[in-house]
Amino acid sequence: MRLAGRLQKLYETYGEDADFWWIYIQEAHPTDGRRPSKRVQIESHKTFDDRQTAAEGCSKVSVLKVPVLLDDMNDSAATAYSASPERFFILGADGKVAYAGERGPFGVDLDALEERLKELLVKGEY
């Protein structure tokens, strides 16, 4: 199962018990960048409105229906969590990182994320 489809299944399974958020960060392969994507036609975000428009477009075509938040134009979330191009985290009930996945796309381990989420839910630590 592709990544977005698997994430959607996790959201459907655990979404009543855990908050899920997708934080849309800077475009990894903008058309005006060094390594443009051939599949995605999105320019670098110059304004917050550009970022919002890109996120809305991605949400419309994706099978992933997790609520979307936007990183600011200083890329504060991406920088703080070393999240470029993608990375998955679980924050515990105390607001601290309870799971930090490796950077994606190759380091993504959704089985490990799901196991940690189950553990936190059973222990009441989420």
Image: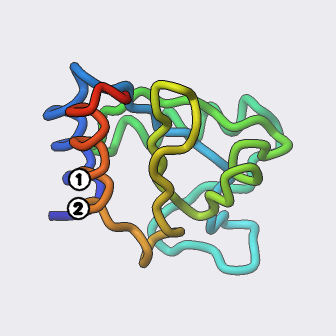
Q: Residue furthest top?
A: 16
Asked if the residue under mark 2 is in contact with the one under mark 1, i.e. CB atoms within 8 Å, the reply is: yes
Task: Give me the residue at 49% from left, 36% from top.
Answer: 91
Task: Give me the residue at 61% from left, 55% from top.
Answer: 42
| Disc 2 crowd, CA 10 A, few/some/many (<14, 14-19, 20+) | few
- Return the residue at label 2: 111
- Return the residue at label 1: 115
* Residue 59 picture location, percent across and down: 41, 37
Mark 2 element type: helix
Tell how many labels.
Answer: 2
Task: Give me the residue at 78% from left, 46% from top.
Answer: 75
Mark 1 element type: helix
Label 2 is placed on what type of residue? Asp
Nearer to me, 104 or 32: 104
Where's the C terminus, which quadrant?
top left
Nearer to me, 76 or 102: 102
Nearer to me, 113 or 85: 113
Task: Give me the residue at 53% from left, 68% from top.
Answer: 103
Depicted 96 relative to depicted 85: above or below: above
**Colouring style:** rainbow
Q: CA distance from mark 1 to mark 2?
A: 6 Å
Judge left or right: residue 70 versus residue 67.
Answer: right
Mark 1 vs mark 2: in front: 1
* Residue 28 picture location, percent across and down: 63, 64
Judge left or right: residue 39 versus residue 10.
Answer: right
Depicted 3 relative to depicted 71: above or below: below
Quadrant for residue 33, please give it. Answer: bottom right
Label 1 is placed on what type of residue? Glu
* Residue 67 picture location, percent across and down: 41, 27
Judge left or right: residue 59 versus residue 94.
Answer: left
